[in-house]
Amino acid sequence: MKKTTELISVIVPCYNEEEAIPIFYNEIIKISNKLSEYDFEYIFINDGSKDKTLKILKSLSKKDKRVRYVSMSRNFGKEAGMLAGLEYSKGDYVTIMDVDLQDPPSLLPSMLNYIKNGGYDSVATRRVSRKGEPPIRSFFARMFYKLINKMSKIEMVDGARDYRLMTRQMVDAVISCKEYNRYSKGLFSFVGFNTKWIEYENVERIAGETKWSFWKLFLYAIEGIVAFTTIPLAISTLMGIVFCLVAFIAVVVILIKTLLIGDPVSGWPSLACIILFCSGIQLFCLGIMGQYLSRTYLESKKRPIYIVKETEENNK
Ligand code: UDP
Ligand code: MG
């Protein structure tokens, strides 16, 4: 019986990437030629781009049948794009990479080797340096990983990229996580399987600019924390208990003091401070509860995670 050639799906989320796509395409073709014993499909996700991204993808897919594309009805974010790619992919092995070549396609042969010969189900990448990134951003990124790893049972690797190669089995497991608020780095870790981590130096974007502002990253970090640990809820309960205890002790102390030496009227500034502090803590804890409640609200609506407007099937 003739052995059928195995298929590798390459998923590429794109948002306003007209400059980067042609360069990326040339690069991935070079790597595919090196891996000639495999078939390839390149699934570009057009995440509601406002530039010529879709036009370029259409002409690429006319020229090269391996190029597929999924075009969203609007910008749904990279997380939704990755999920769409995984759901549309047909490959025995699936990889996700950025179109800006910050995830070097040249690592693909060695990643594949780990899965084929090393007994791994997935090969993930992390960058060891944050060269070319604003120092303040690196600082907050490090703090985030320290914090979340203390709080969550799921391991989050500092510097982990979304760039990874997975077997079909693992892809199906990730797809089976149907949550609306997706934090893929956590989901990849949640589904388990044997993962090999490989490291590389940070590479700067070839063209275009980053889509992540500091604020967007901050919100994404909260997403990660809320999605993978409920410890903040426990902390707010604990804070409540501690404050009740302190208040109780204070009442006892004041009572005894008043009985012994009377009640000279003074100390309103300290009282004002205490009131401010306590109401601040209350709002903080309410905010934490709100974060979880809002996620539950969004999940319960069961809205689709992305909406597709057209794919290469419509372009034949
Ligand atoms: N991206 C996307 N949807 C978005 C934002 C980004 O599909 O809403 C894609 C983008 O085109 C790129 C990848 O996600 O291929 C990573 O984005 P970017 O390079 O801006 O992030 P960075 O590498 O700076 O973290
Ligand atoms: Mg990038």
Image (cartoon, grey):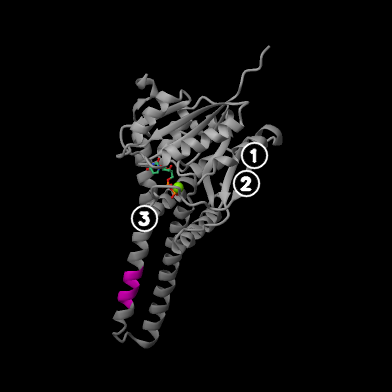
Residue 272 versus residue 86: which sits nearer the camera? 86
User: Which element type, helix, strand or loop, lies under badge 2?
Assistant: strand
Q: Quadrant of the N terminus?
A: top right
Q: Quadrant of the C terminus?
A: top left
Q: Tag on residue 110?
A: 1
User: Which element type, helix, strand or loop, lies under badge 1?
Assistant: helix
Q: Residue furthest top?
A: 1
Which one is earlier in the sequence, the residue at label 3 or at label 1? Answer: 1
> x and y percent of residue 9 in the render?
52, 29
> x and y percent of residue 161 in the render?
52, 46
Residue at the spot 46% in from the left edge and 36% down from the top edge? 12
First to last magenta residue range? 271-277
Task: Give the label, 3 or 2, closer to the camera.
Answer: 2
Which one is earlier in the sequence, the residue at label 3 or at label 2? Answer: 2
User: Which element type, helix, strand or loop, lies under badge 3?
Assistant: helix
Residue under numbered circle 2: 198
Badge 2 vs badge 1, beta-carbon distance below 8 Å: yes
Q: Give yes or no for residue 291 being in the magenta stretch.
A: no
What is the count of numbered marks? 3
- 110 up-or-down from 202: above or below: above
Q: Tag on residue 215?
A: 3
Callout 2 crowding tier (Cα within 10 Å): few <14, some 14–19, many ≥20: some
Which one is earlier in the sequence, the residue at label 2 or at label 1? Answer: 1
Residue at the spot 46% in from the left edge and 60% down from the top edge? 140
Callout 3 crowding tier (Cα within 10 Å): few <14, some 14–19, many ≥20: few
Q: Could you give the CA–CA distance between mark 3 and mark 1, rounded to whole angstroms?
A: 36 Å
